[in-house]
Image (tube, rainbow, N blue to C red):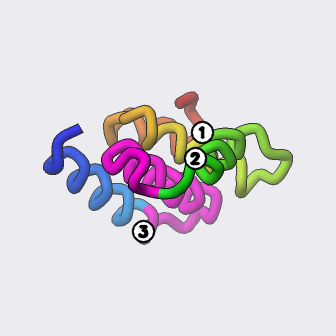
Amino acid sequence: MTENQFQSAIGAAETFKRLTDDPMEADFWSGYIRGSRRLYHGDKFGTAEEHDLWMKAGNSDDESRRRQGAGYMAGFNGLVIGAAITAAKGGRT
């Protein structure tokens, strides 16, 4: 991921998070932003333990945490913003 791709993805995700009226969608974008940062910065962003917790969050019983985890995985896996929009709306990541 280049710096321009990173900045573009973060900017779009922050805009979608700010504009949505759906708190679960906002949770997805929060996770996406964090996952994108982990992808771009690598081990310099967060700890290995935090990364493991975020990766497991997608299986949480708590819907909010599950959406954050789905967003994190989408960002960490480098999902382009168009595909991330589909995932945020309930599609598969």
For the N terminus, the quadrant is top left
Give me the residue at 17% from left, 49% from top. Answer: 3
Residue 23 versus residue 6 in the image, above or below: below
Left or right: residue 81 compared with residue 76: left
Residue 48 pos. (x, y %): 58, 46
Distance between mark 1 and mark 2 Cα atoms: 28 Å
Q: Residue 48: which disc?
A: 2
Q: Secondary structure at mark 3?
A: helix
Report which residue position mark 3 lands on. Answer: 19
Q: Residues within 10 Å of mark 3 (few under 14, many from 20)?
A: few
Give me the residue at 43% from left, 71% from top. Answer: 18
Q: Quadrant of residue 56?
A: top right
Find the residue positioned furthest to the bottom. Answer: 18
- Tell which of 41 and 90 is nearer to you: 41
Distance between mark 2 and mark 3 Cα atoms: 31 Å
Q: Amino acid at mark 2?
A: Ala
Q: Amino acid at mark 1?
A: Gly
- Looking at the image, tell me whether mark 3 or mark 1 is earlier in sequence order: 3
Report which residue position mark 1 lands on. Answer: 90
